[in-house]
Amino acid sequence: MPIFEYVCADCQKSFEKLVERNESVRCPSCEGEHLEKQFSRFGMGATTASAYPSLPQYKSSGGCCNPGNCGCKN
C-alpha cells in the first residue's frame, strides 16, 4: 500500500494517506473529495543520516547530489 500526498482544493490542507487499491480518499479536515495528488519526494537528509549513525554513509561520484545537500557526507 503506497502513501500518497494530497492537498484539499476545498480547505487547502495538505495530508498524507496510506491508500489501498480502489479506496476513495477524503480530506481528514473537511471530508472534501476535491483533492489534488502531489508529487512525493523521498530523501534522506543530513539530519536523518546523523540520527542513524549505524547506516552506511556513501560518497557520491558527483552525479547524484551536491555537497551539503544530502546525507552522503560529501
Image: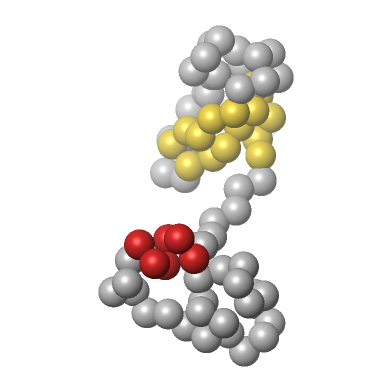
Residue 34 seen anywhere in this rendered image of the structure: no
Q: Residue at x 45, y 60 (%)?
A: 47
Q: Residue at x 60, y 72 (%)?
A: 68
Q: Residue at x 56, y 10 (%)?
A: 30
Q: Answer with left or right where residue 2 lies relative to residue 60.
A: left
Outermost residue toward the left in this view:
54
* Among the 4 quarters of the image, the one containing residue 9: top right
Look at the image and tell me in which quarter the N terminus lies.
Answer: top left
Look at the image and tell me in which quarter the C terminus lies.
Answer: bottom right
Residue 52 seen anywhere in this rendered image of the structure: yes
* Among the 4 quarters of the image, the one containing residue 20: top left
50 or 21: nearer the viewer: 50
Up-down relation of residue 39 to residue 70 (above or below): above
Outermost residue toward the bottom in this view:
61
Up-down relation of residue 50 to residue 66 (above or below): above
Q: Which of the colour schemes (rainbow, by chain, secondary structure, one colour) is used?
A: secondary structure
Q: Answer with left or right where residue 26 lies relative to residue 36.
A: left
Up-down relation of residue 39 to residue 51 (above or below): above
Tag count in the figure?
0
* Among the 4 quarters of the image, the one containing residue 54: bottom left
Q: Residue at x 52, y 86 (%)?
A: 59
Residue 36 percent coordinates (x, y) = 69, 30
Residue 10 percent coordinates (x, y) = 68, 13
4 or 20: nearer the viewer: 4
Residue 29 percent coordinates (x, y) = 52, 14
68 or 20: nearer the viewer: 68
